[in-house]
Image: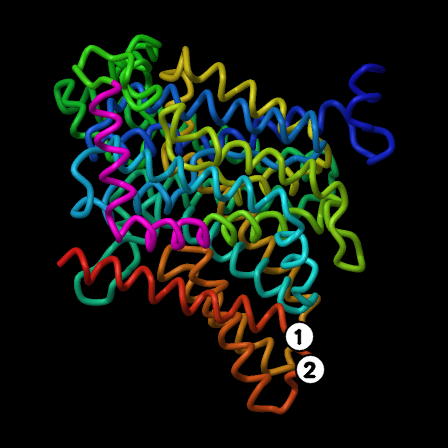
Amino acid sequence: MKLLNKIFHLEEKQTSLKTEIIGGLVTFIAMCYILPVNARILGDMGMNPTGVFVATAFISFLVTMIMGLVANYPIVLSAGMGINAYVAYTLSASFDSWQQRMILLTICGVLFFAFSLTPIRRIIIEAIPKSIKCVISASLGAFILFVGLKSSGIIVASDTTLVTLGDFSDPGMLIAIISIFITICLLFSKNNMIKTMAIPLGILFAAIAGLISSSILYYASGKDITAIPANLPIAPWISGEKFAQLTPYKDVFLYGLFSNSGYDTKAFGKDLVKVFTNPISYIAIFSMMFVNLFDKTATLIAVGEKTGLIDEDGKMQNYHKAILADATGTLICAPMGTSAVTSFAESNVGVSIGAKTGLSACVAALMFLLSAFIYPIFSIFTAGSVTAPALVCVGITIIAGVFGEIDFKDLAVTFSMIIGILFSVLCYSISNGIGFALITYSVIMTVQGKRKEVGLPIYIIAALFIVAFAAETLVKVLQK
């Protein structure tokens, strides 16, 4: 205990060993879905899904451990949603193989790492006024809330209205709704211990209820596993999933140069030339750099103000150490066999129950490492109905906290916040939400004759967002 206190400054940050461990475990549960999801997405472009799963677990362990030990912040990192889909689907028509797309991602990683060594990221974060940081936090909270509603089946797709309420006959949806209300009730308990344990207890209830429901459906259908909805957890003894094996990892490590597929250094050299001679590569690199920057920045801002990373004056503390983890992950992710990492919004789950130090990040990191070997056990916690109480309640908490700090009489901020929330949710992208919020804020302040209150950095960021949106459009046009 004394050693942990010395490393993570538990007493100084007014936290405890138990709180940090629970925070790390709950954060991992809230975001471990990324392991199978990322494996499926990158598998769609030709990579070995099991190899990607192991690679994602390894890279998540490594960069999160760096964040915990070096920077001492409760921020957990893993393969970012958005970049993986962009690489797998958007760029599919412009590149012949998955190796070419991973080479492109490597180039982007090298540039982003070099960019992170400059003070530009800190300048951007510190240049954003307090009111706009609240807008970013609200957008992030809305995004987390929507992810929980969507993955649990409470909100589903609709051909006529885009989204609609899910089916109450879906057991996963009912379990999610009940577990959310149980968690909310526990959060308002007069007992501080129950308040602290509200989210873990909500998750535990959803997991047990989900396992019972899926088992009943499985045996009632004559052992038909397709009878179990995707938002319900499936017990490993029913799914028949084997423990993740390390052998397929060689198929994705270093672009598959060590696999038995016949891909060699000569083929790698040809792919390298094709990437550098493809004009779309340069547009794609700019787009990915920009998405990387603001996905990571949004999380650092939202989590940072609650953990001491950003002080009351908006200045970043321990900047270089905090940036080291995500920059390193972005640098080595593609050679290791997965997509670019980012700081995850779900880190707020651990923070919301009291985690304040890197110890919680280290706990989550160890869980990622463990999941590479015994994943079927953790597959229970990747179901949407199980993660729903954590994501929904944390999202609401973030938004509610921001509302108390925003001056709604300032219409520029109010309009920007509404735009940011809507676009983050409807575009399923935090960076898109931030982009449209900053553009809206800049336009309104300019029209009001308050350009000096905005500051040049905000105008530059807004202009770059416009360029980024144009670049993404150009990629799509050139591929038609």
Give the quarter of the figure containing the C terminus: bottom left
Query: What residue lies at 45% left-to-right and 50% top-to-bottom?
Result: 289
The image shows a total of numbered marks equal to 2
Instruction: Check disc 2 and report its element: helix, strand or loop.
Output: helix
Left of 439 or right of it: where is 253? left
Question: Mark 1 near mark 2, Cβ–Cβ under 8 Å?
Answer: yes
Whole-percent x, y for residue 18 in the image = 72, 23
Identify the main secondary structure in magenta.
helix
Left of 45 or right of it: where is 441? right
Q: Is 203 located above or below residue 65 in the figure? A: below
Instruction: Check disc 1 and report its element: helix, strand or loop.
Output: loop
> In the image, which residues are magenta?
265-291
Q: Amino acid at mark 2?
A: Lys
Badge 1 is on which residue? Answer: 455
Query: What residue lies at 46% left-to-right and 57% top-to-bottom?
Result: 431
Q: Amino acid at mark 1?
A: Gly
Residue 273: say if magenta. Answer: yes
Badge 2 is on which residue? Answer: 452
Identify which residue, 114 or 231, lies in the foreground. Answer: 114
Residue 137: numbered disc: none
Give the quarter of the figure containing the N terminus: top right
Q: Is 369 located above or below residue 196 in the figure? A: above
Is disc 1 surrounded by few (<14), some (14 to 19) or many (20+) residues within 10 Å? Answer: some
Whole-percent x, y for residue 153 in the image = 31, 46
Query: What residue lies at 46% left-to-right and 56% top-to-bottom?
Result: 430
Whole-percent x, y for residue 31 in the image = 47, 34
Q: Is 169 located above or below residue 225 in the figure? A: below
Whole-percent x, y for residue 234 in the image = 31, 23
